Amino acid sequence: MSNRIAVMNAGRIEQIGRPAEIYERPATRFVAEFIGRMNFFTRDEKIVAIRPERARLATERPEIGFAVRGAVRHVLYLGATLEYHLTLDSGERALVEAQNDGNAPPFAAGSIVWFTAPAESCFGM
């Protein structure tokens, strides 16, 4: 990949930067969705964005960071990773990509869980 790239939308530059910068801190929702998958949550009239691989599932609410409760709709086993598709109590949908190291107990469909992410993995749009 190039040292710097530009993401364009309808002939207009949305963001220019290093690949890691664009992936980790997209400037707009379009850039976030163009460059990969992203969870979006509306909180206090602002949008919070979290990449699925930065999110975790927990049985209890953590004391710090972002946390919302929901239920596992279904689980996709992809070998090296597990994809958890959630419906949150708010009605929003969320995706968590978890590494399958063979040690973590998987959450089954129907499990009530907390979708969590450390503050440094969350950003506003």
Image (tube, helix red, strand yellow):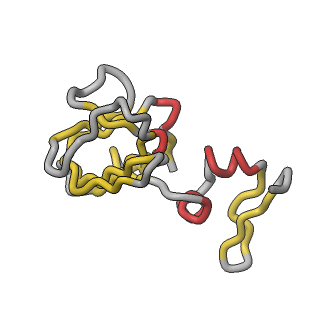
Front-most of 9 and 99?
99
Q: Position of residue 84 (x, y in %)?
A: 32, 50
Q: Position of residue 27 (x, y in %)?
A: 62, 53
**Viewed as shown, does residue 32 lie left or right of 14?**
left
Front-most of 83 and 92?
83
Q: Position of residue 37 (x, y in %)?
A: 50, 58
Residue furthest right as drawn: 3
Identity of the residue drawn at 27% across and 39% down: 106
How many numbered marks appear? 0
Q: Quadrant of residue 33?
A: bottom right
Front-most of 24 and 95?
95
**Viewed as shown, does residue 55 lie left or right of 92?**
right
Residue furthest bottom as drawn: 10
Identity of the residue drawn at 41% across and 42% down: 98
Identity of the residue drawn at 48% across and 39% down: 54
State the quadrant of the N terminus: bottom right
| Residue 89 against residue 67 in the figure, above or below | below
Q: Position of residue 59 (x, y in %)?
A: 21, 30
Identity of the residue drawn at 26% across and 52% down: 86
Residue furthest top as drawn: 63
